[in-house]
Image: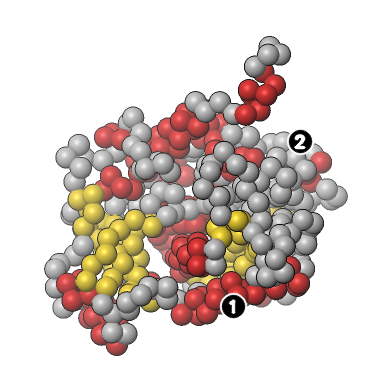
Amino acid sequence: MNPEYATIKQWLHEHQISEVECLVPDITGNARGKFVPANQYLDGGEPRLPESILIQTVTGEYCDDHWDFVEPTDADMILRPDPSSLRVVPWAREPTAQIIHDCCSMDGSLHPLATRNVLRNVLAEYEREGLRPVVAPEVEFYLVKKNTDPDLELGPPVGRSGRAEAARMSYSIDAVSEFEDFVEDMYDFAEAQRLSVDTLIHENGAAQMEINFLHGDAMDLADQVFVFKRTIRELAHRHGMYATFMSKPMQREPGSALHIHQSIVSADTGDNIFSEGGNDNPRLLSYIAGLQRYTPEVISFYAPNVNSYRRLAPELSAPINLNWGYDNRTTAFRVPHSSPAAMRVENRFPGADVNPYLAFAATLASGLLGMRQALQPSEPHQGTANEDEVEVARSLEEGLRSLGTTPELVEMFGERFLNAYAAVKLDEFEEFNQVISSWEREHLLLQV
């Protein structure tokens, strides 16, 4: 038996698992897969799924060009379990395991349309350079009262006081305590799943929370964010509310981000390559320059949905241009004050709605290309950057226009994947663009 399967079999036995969730992150970053009885999981051969599930739109539809990217026979792909992703499902009634799988073509090669494989390819580029990325994501989300009517605006849920938040409560301890039972269950579920969550704060929005993860391996942290989103949604249901990772769920509330702190260490020594020479470290500066150079091309990985661009707007505490600065939270790329060993860059573009595998891949690829080409960044920004001109796309369609125009990025992500991603997201944009909003009926019906 393959050593990996032996490890999994032993783990399933030790935890008395009766059912296995075979999970695959789709293009949106949500879980696809199947449930398999534990006694059949390893005896029935490698699980399989249709490859077409990898490129469904967020509504579950297929784009017009769907069959240009997958076999017209709707062929299967092989699912290979990653033992490092073995976790219990703490909310399941019966002892259940969740295992994230890598998608492989029938010839055994990594499937080019699987987003986990996209990140794996970027990490392989670092490995060739003798480097290893270290990341620490910060994930924001809203708790909202249950709302089954999509035409109604969302609102904060009622806390233990019996009242909903009606004022800005940034960093408020008491506001977090309003949802004490939810928070305690969150930490219990995180511990059960080996999620390295660190601090919890109340963000600026009504019932808006932020969880910081401890820094670590990029693939492991992408897996953790993937699992964390499932966990938070399940917990919210249990407590009679919803949790949303929409980038901008409410008109009068700030957006939700998924900021990515990143540093690069030597694979041999573990030393942070950004730490030598302090703020003037040439590789740190080239990494930042790479983020500035390639963000316009990969912006759709940081803002992957039509709603995402509502957050990337002036005066909404989100980046609107490519400025960077030292400990400047108004810039897109921030170098926090830190010890030399912790020298890092924070990418503040990604929204909470990202697929973490693609967002990590995009930011790490951009920084690596910047270092390879010894690019030079602009001068560090002084003052408030979001008072400067808007330099980034303001719609999903605009954000996709430059995707795949640079050969070095195409090589890292794969031409087939980039074309499929653009086709899926353009289909979503066109479907959204057919919806006539209440604003249009209000202001254009009789005035134009």
Q: Is residue 344 above or below residue 146?
A: below
Q: Which residue is mark 1?
A: 184
Q: Which of the two marks, 1 or 2, is nearer to us in this view?
A: 1
At horizontal 33% and vertical 30% (from top left) the residue drawn is: 64
When asked about the image quadrant of residue 162, the answer is bottom right
Q: Is residue 391 visible?
A: yes
When asked about the image quadrant of residue 36, the answer is bottom left
User: What kind of element bears circle 1?
Assistant: helix
Q: Is residue 141 visible?
A: no
Residue 17 image offset from top left, x and y in percent: 28, 80
Q: Which mark is residue 389?
A: 2
Kind of residue at disc 1: Glu
Quadrant location of the N terminus? bottom left
Task: Look at the numbered discs 1 and 2 and tell me whether their residues touch, using CB distance below 8 Å.
Answer: no
Kind of residue at disc 2: Glu
Comparing 110 with 84, the one in front is 84
Q: Which residue is situated farthest in the right direction here?
A: 383
At horizontal 60% and vertical 75% (from top left) the residue drawn is: 181
